[in-house]
Amino acid sequence: MYEPIRTKSVHTPADHADDFPHRTREEELDIQLAGHLAALLAVTDELGLGEAGDRIAEQVARLRGAPPARHAGLSDASAATLHRRAHALAGRALVVAASRADTVVAILSAERMDAHTAAVQAAAAESPAAPSRLVGAL
């Protein structure tokens, strides 16, 4: 019913081991972590948090080997929306930092999560019209 395979598979690892670049797990995690931190830096810059942005930029530069691009605060989103987005990005960075045992970035990410949680809760306290919607989105 089926014809036997007559040629060698093109997926044989020994034949094509050097055909494409390979990265280690550590290199992949570094790239992923730098990406999450760069996204967090963009939102942090949109919020105008200079000192926090500088600390994040230091870690991105360490991981990438070059300083990251900085963004001007030009977002149309509300501050609460930006804080929720930053909280989520810091959480992603924390997960990857814990996976690669980078305590400096893990601590920085946890601090940023706490700061953004506090900012969202403060915004919810100021506008009592929809506090559960703001806090529940975290």
Image (cartoon, grey):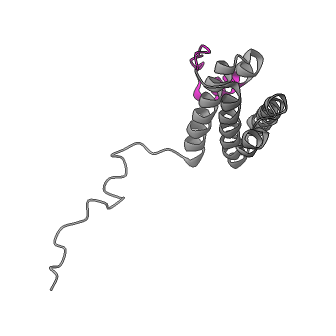
Instruction: Please report the residue visible at 66 percent of the width from the left and 44 percent of the height from the top.
Output: 96
- Point out the stretch of residues depicted in magenta: 56-75
Q: Which residue lies furthest to the bottom in this view?
A: 1
Q: Left or right? Give the position of 93 relative to 68.
A: right
For this rendering, which residue is in front, 11 or 88?
88
Instruction: Measuring from the top left, give residue 110's x and y in whole percent.
Output: 79, 38
Q: Left or right? Give the position of 110 relative to 41.
A: right
For this rendering, which residue is in front, 125 or 60?
125
The answer to whether residue 64 is above or below residue 10 is: above
Instruction: Measuring from the top left, give residue 31's x and y in whole percent.
Output: 56, 37
Instruction: Please report the residue visible at 50 percent of the width from the left and 44 percent of the height from the top.
Output: 23
Image quadrant where one finds the C terminus: top right
Instruction: Measuring from the top left, give residue 113's x and y in whole percent.
Output: 77, 36
Q: Left or right? Give the position of 76 relative to 134.
A: left
Residue 70, picture quadrant: top right
Residue 88, picture quadrant: top right
Image quadrant where one finds the N terminus: bottom left
Report the number of discs. 0
Instruction: Please report the residue visible at 66 percent of the width from the left and 31 percent of the height from the top.
Output: 81
- Is 120 a magenta residue? no
The answer to whether residue 131 is above or below residue 45 is: below
For this rendering, which residue is in front, 23 or 100?
100
Instruction: Please report the residue visible at 19 percent of the width from the left and 74 percent of the height from the top.
Output: 5
Residue 104, picture quadrant: top right
